[in-house]
Amino acid sequence: MVAIDDITTLLPQKPPFVMVGKLLSVEDDKITTGYIIEEGNVLVEDGVFTEAGLLENIAQTAAAGAGYRATVENKPVQNGYIGAVKNFAVFARPKMNDELKTEVTETSRVFNTQTIHGKVWLGEKLLAQCEMRIFLQGDE
């Protein structure tokens, strides 16, 4: 586990729009986060996490990894913007109090554009996956 007391220091997003809870690992091209879906989450409808919530969870996992790397390099956390989503598939939607594990693998980076592949898990069950293109503001 990566020792971070407050994951929001790694994210441009702020409550109530934070969809990750803890940074579990950062490897060369792979980031893993954990998240317990809490009551009051703005992307929960009728006790179930929405498709938009799953997508945002993947994007924020990528952001947490980028924020961690920026912090280690003593640089500011960058804003990122979803530019495209490809092959988004939702197999099941989790409920409140479920604990998600999200894995994001960077598949390419060209200038300020990052392409990732993300997967959201509930235990051994794959809930959702997609490819995402993210534009990083101010990246060199």
Image (tube, grey):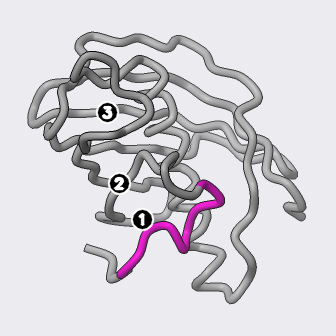
Which corner quadrant holds the C terminus? bottom right
Marks 2 and 1 sit apart, C-alpha to C-alpha, by 9 Å
**Helix, strand or loop for disc 2:** strand
Residue 120's label in the rendered image is 3
- Amino acid of disc 3: Val
Q: Is residue 133 left or right of residue 45?
A: right
Position in image of residue 8 (x %, y %): 50, 67
Residue 32's mark? 2
The answer to whether the residue labelled 3 contacts the one labelled 2, judged by CB atoms less than 8 Å apart, is: no
Q: Position of residue 25 (x, y in %)?
A: 33, 65
Q: Nearer the viewer, mark 1 or mark 3?
A: 3
- Amino acid carrying label 2: it is Thr
In the drawing, what numbered circle is on residue 5? none
The span shown in magenta is 5-13
Mark 1 highlights which residue?
27
Q: Is 106 in front, or is 67?
A: 67
Residue closest to the far bottom: 74
C-alpha span from label 3 to label 2: 10 Å
